[in-house]
Image (cartoon, helix red, strand yellow):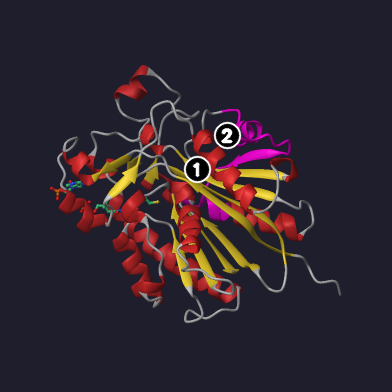
Amino acid sequence: MTQKKQAGILGLGAYLPERILTNADLEKMVDTSDEWIRTRTGIRERRIAEKGTATSDLAVKASLEAIQNSGLKPSDLDLIILATVTPDMIFPSTACILQNKIGATCPAFDLSAACSGFTYGLALAEGLIRSETYKHILVVGAEVISGFINWKDRSTCVLFGDGAGAAVIGETHDGHGILATYMGSDGSQARLLQIPAGGSAIPPSISSIETGLHYVQMDGAEVFKSAVRTMGDAIQEITKRAHLTIQGIDCLIPHQANLRILNAVSDRTKIPIEKIFVNLDRYGNMSAASTIVALYEAVKEGKIKKGSTVVMVAFGSGLTWAACALRW
Ligand SMILES: CC(C)(COP(=O)(O)OP(=O)(O)OC[C@H]1O[C@@H](n2cnc3c(N)ncnc32)[C@H](O)[C@@H]1OP(=O)(O)O)[C@@H](O)C(=O)NCCC(=O)NCCS
């Protein structure tokens, strides 16, 4: 019997806008405090893209680094999957805009799974590599979410930030690469976290803008509970699918929404908090960019080494959740 190909990450890239918005800056914008934000979320600062910056602009920088680190050229790519909730425009896809900006010629499309988007993209890319449909797939998570935040709403504006990360997926050998993937959704909970207007349900109008329906709206307490439950369950499921044990996980790369969520996931799964990579203190929640930027930094900081067992886990609007186990 012929062994199926194994897929894995060939190169990583990330890009964070230079402008830093601190909790002290937010104190001047809304009725909040550094102490409240730090103790309730763990966030100290976030990056905000300059006015006029599109999601594809951040994606270009992360993608070119990932392509270079994989030893490839943009013309070697067979497919681009770009996960975002803040596309450059409704159509064409941001993936097509990125394709043109980096000088690639392959098919390209956007993937909408909110904060789980990058991990969904990894699952899709893995299947397409293993089935030998494509050889080199660029998976990107990129957001300029700052344009969709009501900067007068203290319950949401302190949480989010802009950024981008990218990975080139291709064939890997000797047991290194993606061990298993898992995706889940529950559309009955869609109302918990959404941007209600701007699509076909509520097309843009003066009234939709005046009532703030183009901004992120969230039931924070319910989202919190769902995040802990679904990420905890996804970790159990991916551990089973990859034939791992909880003790065998060297590094957990979770979606970076709230440090209290990560502490609760640690309690629920018994993964020690020291094994959970955290960078949300510096970037806040970057939606689809969060897990890939965290993976990039964990590798750079030496928290993930050759042979490490890594689990990525994400949760977001939809509701969606996803996990991926890798041997580095
Ligand atoms: C949003 C979140 C931080 C709120 O924390 P919390 O401890 O649940 O706080 P509550 O919502 O109970 O609010 C407590 C009080 O703080 C206030 N508050 C909310 N935001 C505030 C802020 N930035 N500064 C100061 N006070 C704030 C609320 O108005 C509320 O006041 P009240 O009791 O007078 O009504 C938390 O629910 C959360 O992180 N949820 C998940 C969000 C998330 O991860 N979203 C993305 C998922 S992909």
Quadrant of image for the C terminus? bottom right
Which residue does the image show at 22% across and 55% down from the upper left? 38
* 114 to the left or right of 132: left
Give the SS element for disc 2.
Answer: helix
Residue 266: x and y in percent read 36, 72
Question: Residue 94, labelled with which disc?
Answer: 2
Residue 318 in view: no
Q: Is 38 above or below relative to 228?
A: above
Which residue does the image show at 14% across and 40% down from the upper left? 31
Q: Is 211 above or below relative to 130?
A: above
Residue 278: x and y in percent read 37, 61
Q: Which residue is mark 1?
A: 142
Question: Residue 47, labelled with which disc?
Answer: none
* 153 to the left or right of 178: left
Q: Amino acid at mark 1?
A: Ala
Q: Kindly indicate whether the residue at mark 2 contacts the one at mark 1 (C-beta within 8 angstroms).
A: yes
Q: Amino acid at mark 2?
A: Thr
Extreme residue in the right direction: 1
* 277 to the left or right of 152: right
Magenta span: 91-120
Residue 248 belongs to magenta span: no
Mark positioned earlier in the residue sequence (1 or 2): 2
Which residue does the image show at 56% across and 79% down from the upper left? 244
Image quarter for residue 182? bottom right
Which residue does the image show at 57% across and 68% down from the upper left? 325
Residue 210 in view: yes
Residue 164: x and y in percent read 49, 44
Residue 14: x and y in percent read 50, 48
Q: CA distance from mark 1 to mark 2?
A: 10 Å
Give the SS element for disc 1.
Answer: strand
Foreground of the two, 179 or 172: 172
